[in-house]
Image: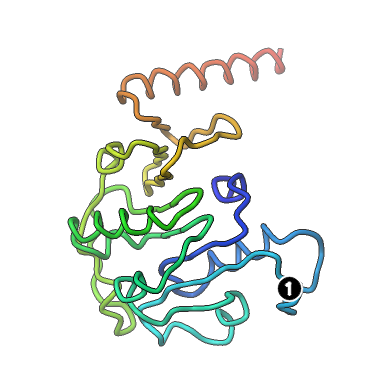
Amino acid sequence: MKLVSEAQPASILDVGVGWGKYGALFRMCLESGYANLSDRRNWKIRIDGVEAFPEYIGAIQQAIYNHIFLEPIEQVLPKLGEYDLIFMGDVIEHFPKEKGRQLLEALLARAQSRLILSTPNGPYSQGDILGNPFERHQSYWEIDDFLSYPHVEVYANKKSIIAVLSRFPIQQAGRRWAMGGYRRQPWTAALGAYLKYRWQRCCKQRQKAS
């Protein structure tokens, strides 16, 4: 959530709503104060969603999002305006590689602050789920696939890759690491910086313990 909240978005597009878990997190964490969020008049942030499989959408999702486009993202794109932040949680791997790249470019052009996406870190086979053909995995993405973008941050652990893309230099609130952090630098430099960071933390913990 830190990657989302530091952007201070007033509008979010969640591509691939699914069960609505990310929309719920955004609504809960970004809305200010203790307003009754079941009353839409108290919403300060616009959160729209895109879901290609309408059978996933019910009362729960409708209570979270301002609007949900019930079509594949390719059909929604011509209708979209700009959003402060666009989010794709484990979606890009459901497209062939070249089509996925085209989708990233189209969404990045509509993201005023940043485009945040996650994808499995490593090959992960998946077919239809609950009769939904859009759940099939059609591509495998690696860290290097995202480092060609001019303004990018990439974070990875054993299970997931998270990429933050922007049309402008990304303003960081502070240093973040999750197994590895990349800011358009060779992997050796990123690894060296990470090891130094871990060593400094270890030294501080030992000093406190002694």
For mark 1, give the secondary structure: loop
Q: Residue at x 72, y 17 (%)?
A: 208
Residue 6 higher or lower than 65, as above or below: above
Residue kind at label 1, given as amino acid type: Leu
In this picture, residue 200 sits left or right of residue 41? left
Q: Position of residue 89 (x, y in %)?
A: 42, 60
Q: Position of residue 130 (x, y in %)?
A: 34, 83
Quadrant holding the C terminus: top right
In this picture, residue 55 sits left or right of residue 9? left
128, 206: nearer the viewer: 128
Q: Position of residue 209 (x, y in %)?
A: 70, 17
60, 31: nearer the viewer: 31
Q: Which residue is mark 1?
A: 37
Q: Quadrant location of residue 99? A: bottom left
Q: Residue at x 31, y 40 (%)?
A: 149
In this picture, residue 156 sits left or right of residue 92? right
Residue 205 higher or lower than 177, as above or below: above
Q: Quadrant location of residue 77? A: bottom left
Q: Position of residue 119 (x, y in %)?
A: 35, 54
205, 7: nearer the viewer: 7
Q: Quadrant location of residue 203? A: top right
Q: Residue at x 51, y 48 (%)?
A: 113
Q: Residue at x 25, y 43 (%)?
A: 145
